[in-house]
Structures are given as structure tokens and as C-alpha cells.
Image (spheres, rainbow, N blue to C red):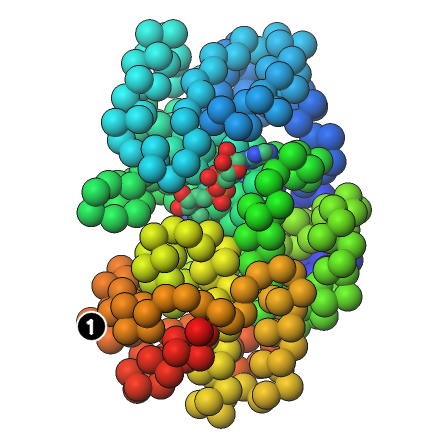
């Protein structure tokens, strides 16, 4: 990350991400959606752009994007997916490949993902594979996609064997995040995205955590200035982690804080808890566990649990069988050599990877969520 202004109040709208074989800029700016035509023109001379979106996002935001493209002389080709994780499959993409190939897209035609993480992952997979790879642009429309899914180049679809098991790394050439579009996002989805923001502060930024504590009420009211700062700040954290570990061999694992527990909770709840709600509970379990192991002081734990609760995320009342959650954890793909690998906080802005936690304590941490 070239511009190193750290801190929640550093409202620099552009974050540049530098990887071994790609560089791109993530722009965070209210109203950006209606200016994407010229932004794209500055990156490519292409006369066409292929958009992938979903029905919900299209109903609110597609016209803004296509108008901007047309005004710049870029002809949009649009494929609209069915929303919902059930539709994140390879078969759902086959008509999209057909449509784009029939429209004679070329190696230089950019594919634009207009949507949340689902659209971003699926569109990225199309961009990675169609004609053996075309330029890809992320236009994230959920908070989760802005601060997490749109950055880092992981793309893919689900299969009957599990989530995101078919995919590729394919970095975008640009990410355009317009916080204004969050105004139409369902409340529960917005709050779920906040879980990833809280996660970022806990693993990387003590000052950012304090700033979020201070600003959470205004963020929940969608104060556009604060929201822009929050998104830009979180983009910076995610970008830095990705830069340091583009292919997920090492410290990118820190982003899994709350996720080993969270994925299991999500699965056992049969997705009645959203991803954000599941990882909120997962962060609570990991935080409690860290305190029980005497790694984290109880005052820090109290602040973490309070912020999660104030954000509107669950910290207790989990109605799932603790043993079922424990068993599901053992199947998580992040398990290395049959040991459970947990990311645990030891102070604000810092986490450690532990694979030596006694199963009994893990079970107790899950039990504590009920
Ligand atoms: N690639 C990565 O690194 C990465 C990281 C995290 C998550 N993911 C993936 O992201 C997906 C989840 O993403 P998500 O949480 O953004 O969910 P999502 O894309 O399913 O969007 C959630 C819901 O909100 C709707 N929506 C999106 N933007 C809207 C807007 N502005 N206004 C109104 N409605 C809107 C969608 O249609 C959908 O119904 C999962 O498939 C997950 O695997 C990928
Ligand atoms: Zn997550």
C-alpha cells in the first residue's frame, strides 16, 4: 500500500495495491458509480464492457452504471444472475459464457462485477477463464464486498462438495467502491459487513478499533463521510494483508479471525445466521478463548464484545448444538494436519496463530455462545 496514512480518519479515497504481477487502485468515493465511464476509459480503450450483476442490485444500480458507460462511448453487455448463495454454481454461469461469446467479447473487453461478493466471485471466475482471461473490474455494492471480497483476487463458485471449491486467483484492474449504494442494501446485510470491519480493527489496528467504537452510532445511521472513511480504512487494512501474502501462504490467515468458529456456525445453522453474524459469534468465541488462555486481558475482551453487540451483531443466544459446531470445525478446510488452527487476539491490533489449543477449551468456548 503506497500511501501509508494509517488511522481511521485518513480519508484518502484511493488505495493502491501492489502485487508481484499486478498493480491496481481501489477508489472509495460517494457518487462514483455515475462516473465509472470516464474512470474505465482512463484504463482501457475498449468499446464494449460486459457487466455481470444480480437482479436485486440491477433494480437499484444498473441504470446508473450503463448510462455512465454509454455517455463515454462504451457499449454495455449485461448478464443478470439470480441472487442467493444457492445460485453460486458453475451451471448458473454457463449461459453467461454463451451470452458473452455470442456477443463476441474480445481479450481486451473488460468484465465488470456490479454486486456483492457473490457477483464479484462469479464474475471474477468468468473473467479468469473466458478466452483464457480478460480484464476484470470490481464494483462492490455490499459493505462486505467493499472491504473484503472485492480485494485480493479470489474468485470462484460453490459445488455440492462445499463453498468456493472451484475457482482461480484473478486480480481486478481496478476496484470502484461507491458508499452511496449502501443506502439500498438490506439492513441485515449492512450489519453483517460491519463484522468484517470489526475483525480488521481487532487483527490490525488498535486506533482503528477505538475510532470505530467512537463512530459506530453514526456509521449505523449511514453518515456518508464516516462510512467513506470506514470503507477506505478497511480497504487499506485488507490491501496490506493481501500485499504481504498474495497467495495465502502465511499472514493472510489472520483474516480468518472468527472464521474457523464462524464457518462451522454458518454451516450448522444452515445459513440462517448470515456470514457476518456467524463470524461475530466466532470472534466472541475466539476472544473468550484467548482470555481463558490468559493471552488477552478481560478489559480488552469486554470492549470487543461490547462493540460487536452495539453494531447489532450477536454475541450470545446461539441456538445450535455445541458438539455439532465443534464437529463442523474439524471439517473446515483451514484445518492443517488435522489440528484446529485458531487465530487468537493477544492485544488490540494483534493476533497469533495457535494450533495447540486443547479441544476441551474450544468446546467450552462454543458452549459459551449459547
Ligand atoms: N473473494 C473473496 O475474497 C471473498 C471474501 C469474502 C466473501 N466472499 C464471498 O462473498 C459472498 C457474500 O457476499 P455478500 O455478503 O456481499 O453477499 P451477496 O453478494 O449475496 O449480497 C447480499 C444480498 O444483497 C443484495 N445486494 C447487494 N448489493 C445491494 C445493494 N447495494 N442494494 C440492495 N441490495 C443489494 C444481493 O442481491 C443479495 O441479495 C459469498 O459467496 C462469499 O463466499 C468472497
Ligand atoms: Zn468473512
Q: Residue 358, image x and y in percent?
A: 30, 86
* In this view, 267 is above or below 185: below
Give me the residue at 29% from left, 41% from top.
158
Residue 313 figure quarter: bottom right
Q: In the displayed structure, does residue 142 sit left or right of residue 289? A: right
Dot 1 falls on a residue whose secondary structure is: loop
Residue 197 figure quarter: bottom right
Residue 154 figure quarter: top left
Give me the residue at 27% from left, 65% from top.
328
Whether residue 18 appears in this view of the structure is no
Q: Residue 115, image x and y in percent?
A: 52, 32
Q: Residue 348, image x and y in percent?
A: 61, 76
Q: How crowded is mark 1: few (under 14 residues within 10 Å), some or many (20 or more)?
A: few
| Residue sitting nearer the eye, 305 or 144 | 305
* In this view, 291 is above or below 89: below
Q: Does the residue labelled 1 lie within 8 Å of ligand 2?
A: no
| Residue sitting nearer the eye, 104 or 91 | 91
Numbered disc total: 1
Q: Residue 77, image x and y in percent?
A: 47, 12
| Residue sitting nearer the eye, 317 or 313 | 317
Give me the residue at 58% from left, 81% from top.
301
* In this view, 312 is above or below 369: above
* In this view, 312 is above or below 306: above
Residue underneath mark 1 = 338
Whether residue 308 appears in this view of the structure is yes
**Quadrant containing the C terminus in the rendered view:** bottom left
| Residue sitting nearer the eye, 195 or 101 | 195
Give me the residue at 61% from left, 38% from top.
185
Amino acid at each position: 500500500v503506497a500511501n501509508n496514512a494509517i488511522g481511521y480518519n485518513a480519508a484518502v479515497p484511493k488505495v493502491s495495491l501492489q502485487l508481484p504481477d499486478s498493480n491496481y487502485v481501489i477508489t472509495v468515493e460517494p457518487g462514483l458509480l455515475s462516473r465509472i465511464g470516464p474512470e474505465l476509459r482512463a484504463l482501457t480503450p475498449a468499446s464494449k464492457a460486459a457487466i455481470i450483476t444480480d437482479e436485486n442490485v440491477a433494480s437499484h444500480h444498473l441504470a446508473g452504471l450503463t448510462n455512465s458507460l454509454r455517455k463515454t462511448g462504451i457499449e454495455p453487455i449485461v448478464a443478470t444472475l439470480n441472487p442467493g448463495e444457492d445460485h453460486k454454481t458453475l451451471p448458473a454461469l454457463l449461459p453467461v459464457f454463451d451470452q458473452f461469446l455470442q456477443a463476441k467479447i474480445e481479450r481486451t473487453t473488460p468484465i465488470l462485477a456490479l454486486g456483492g461478493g457473490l457477483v464479484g466471485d462469479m464474475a471474477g471466475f468468468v473473467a479468469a477463464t473466458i478466452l483464457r482471461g480478460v480484464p476484470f473490474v470490481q464494483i462492490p455494492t455490499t459493505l462486505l464486498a467493499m472491504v473484503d471480497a472485492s480485494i485480493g483476487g479470489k474468485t470462484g463458485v460453490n459445488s455440492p462438495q462445499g463453498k468456493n471449491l472451484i475457482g482461480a486467483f484473478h486480480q481486478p484492474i481496478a476496484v470502484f467502491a461507491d458508499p452511496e449504494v449502501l443506502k439500498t442494501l438490506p439492513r441485515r446485510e449492512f450489519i453483517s459487513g460491519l463484522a468484517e470491519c470489526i475483525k480488521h480493527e481487532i487483527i490490525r489496528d488498535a486506533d482503528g478499533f477505538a475510532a470505530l467504537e467512537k463512530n459506530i452510532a453514526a456509521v449505523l445511521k449511514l453518515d456518508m463521510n464516516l462510512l467513506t472513511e470506514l470503507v477506505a480504512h478497511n480497504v487499506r487494512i485488507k490491501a496490506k494483508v493481501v500485499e504481504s501474502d498474495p497467495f495465502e501462504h502465511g499472514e493472510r490467515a489472520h483474516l480468518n479471525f472468527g472464521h474457523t468458529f464462524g464457518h462451522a456456525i454458518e454451516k450448522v445453522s444452515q445459513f440462517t445466521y448470515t456470514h457476518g453474524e456467524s463470524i461475530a459469534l466466532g470472534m466472541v468465541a475466539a476472544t473468550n478463548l484467548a482470555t481463558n488462555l490468559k493471552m488477552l486481558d478481560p478489559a480488552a475482551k469486554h470492549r470487543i464484545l461490547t462493540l460487536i453487540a452495539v453494531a447489532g451483531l450477536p454475541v450470545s443466544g446461539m441456538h445450535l448444538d455445541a458438539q455439532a459446531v465443534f464437529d463442523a470445525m474439524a471439517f473446515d478446510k483451514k484445518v492443517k494436519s488435522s489440528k484446529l488452527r485458531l487465530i487468537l487476539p493477544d492485544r488490540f491490533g494483534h493476533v497469533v496463530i495457535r494450533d495447540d489449543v486443547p479441544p476441551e477449551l474450544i468446546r467450552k468456548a462454543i458452549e459459551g455462545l449459547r
